[in-house]
Amino acid sequence: MKKVSVLVVFSVVALVTGCYKEVSFDVKPYIEFKDLRKEIRLDQFSGSKKDSIILTIKFQDGDGDLGLNEEEKKAAVTQQDFNYVVRIFRQKKGVFQEIIPDVTYSGFFPRLKVDNKKGPIEGTLDYSFVYFQDFTPKKDSLKYQVMIKDRSGNVSNMIETKVVILNEF
């Protein structure tokens, strides 16, 4: 009986390790649109309504060099070298046109691997925007195009979101 249980355990271990496949992604980041949601909130200072937009993307990167630490971020801020790049499109008369806001919606996300070991990484990344309803046209229809950049300068593909309607209520 002992030989049978040792053989079963050995077989299971061999099967599991034999089926395990090392994950491999391109060193150029790859992203997919996952979700875009809106939450209506009250501003704690002014009491006015604001639309909080949360954009979620899925990502994969072969060498795991996504995100910036605080020192890297300070250097990137001076050059406006964003690692999360956002383009905004507003619908006018049924056609979406890119708008260039006074303040960019592009920004930065922190290092996603803090151990600095090279290797594949995947997951989701949330990024948020805030629009005060007092300064937003009624039923404003927007969509976004997004891409990310790793520390090596590799730029991901660009994704496009679904449409979100601001200042509905």
Image (tube, grey):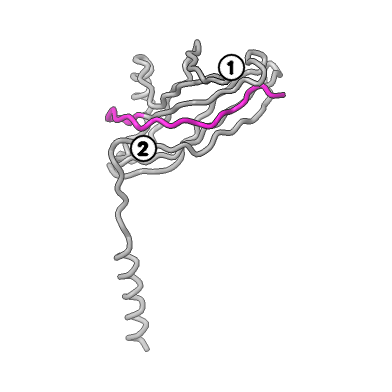
Residue 15: horizontal and vertical position, in percent?
33, 69
Q: Is residue 69 left or right of residue 118?
A: right
For mark 2, give the secondary structure.
strand
Q: Which residues are magenta?
A: 149-169
Instruction: Classify the position of the C terminus by image quarter.
Output: top right
Where residue 79 sits, quadrant-wise, is top left
For mark 1, give the secondary structure.
loop
Q: Is residue 152 left or right of residue 12?
A: left
Q: Judge the density around disc 2: few (<14), some (14-19), many (≥20) Cα neighbours within 10 Å.
A: many
How many numbered tags mark residues here?
Answer: 2
| Residue position for label 2 | 30
Residue at the extreme front: 94
Where residue 93 sits, quadrant-wise, is top right
Residue 133: horizontal and vertical position, in percent?
66, 18
- Secondary structure mostly taken by the magenta-highlighted segment of the chain: loop
Is residue 131 shown above or below 38? above
| Residue position for label 1 | 93
Is residue 80 shown above or below 33? above
Q: Is residue 74 magenta?
A: no
Residue at the extreme bottom: 1
The residue lying at 33 percent from left, 40 percent from top is 61
Q: Is residue 150 magenta?
A: yes
The residue lying at 32 percent from left, 29 percent from top is 155
The residue lying at 56 percent from left, 20 percent from top is 91
Instruction: Classify the position of the N terminus by image quarter.
Output: bottom left
Of mark 2 and mark 1, the one earlier in the sequence is 2
The residue lying at 52 percent from left, 20 percent from top is 96
Dot 2 amino acid type: Tyr
Residue 52: horizontal and vertical position, in percent?
60, 27
